[in-house]
């Protein structure tokens, strides 16, 4: 993940009133956070898959054990990263997420 901002890797308690304040509706906030977390998760999965594709090998060799260690290290790096939901909440709290509400049709 290319995020350089410090995001906590564990869950912290947040005030729902503060989270709901920008949208004035906690449910709308949850939808925004959910969509952003999904975007982050998909991007991370693509990045991880691309890195792990470099290790694909059709034949078994003595170097396979070494390559597996590298794969394990890459996987562990991604496991230590903050969860996408925590990144999304952090971005939302720092006003880094752009969102817009669908216009209601008054017909």
Image (cartoon, rainbow, N blue to C red):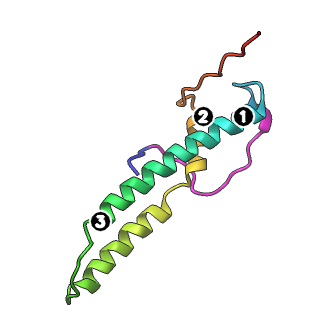
- The residue at 25%/66% (across/down) is 54
Q: Is residue 21 visible?
A: yes
Query: Which residue does the numbered mark 1 point to in the structure image?
Result: 19
Number of marks: 3
Query: Which residue does the numbered mark 2 point to in the structure image?
Result: 92
* Alpha carbon distance from label 3 to label 1: 39 Å
- The residue at 77%/9% (across/down) is 107
Query: Which residue does the numbered mark 3 point to in the structure image?
Result: 53
Q: Position of residue 8 (x, y in %)?
A: 57, 52
* Alpha carbon distance from label 2 to label 3: 33 Å
* Alpha carbon distance from label 2 to label 1: 8 Å
- The residue at 75%/31% (across/down) is 20
Q: In the image as oriented, which residue stretches furthest toward the top?
A: 107
Looking at the rendered structure, the secondary structure element under dot 2 is helix
Judge left or right: residue 98 versus residue 71: right
Q: Which residues are magenta?
A: 5-19
In the depicted structure, whether residue 76 falls above or below residue 105: below
N-term mark: 2 or 3: 3
Residue 29 in magenta?
Answer: no
Q: Position of residue 95 (x, y in %)?
A: 57, 28
N-term mark: 2 or 1: 1
Principal secondary structure, stretch drawn in magenta:
loop
């Amino acid at each position: 993940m290319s995020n350089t901002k410090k995001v906590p890797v564990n869950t912290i308690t947040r005030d729902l009133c503060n989270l709901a304040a920008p949208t004035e509706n906690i449910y709308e906030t949850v939808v925004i956070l959910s969509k952003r977390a999904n975007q982050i998760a998909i991007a991370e999965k693509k990045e991880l898959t691309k890195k792990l594709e470099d290790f694909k090998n059709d034949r078994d060799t003595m170097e396979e054990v070494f390559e597996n260690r590298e794969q394990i290290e890459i996987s562990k790096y991604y496991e230590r990263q903050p969860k996408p939901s925590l990144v999304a909440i952090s971005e939302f709290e720092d006003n880094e997420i752009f969102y817009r509400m669908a216009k209601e049709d008054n017909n």
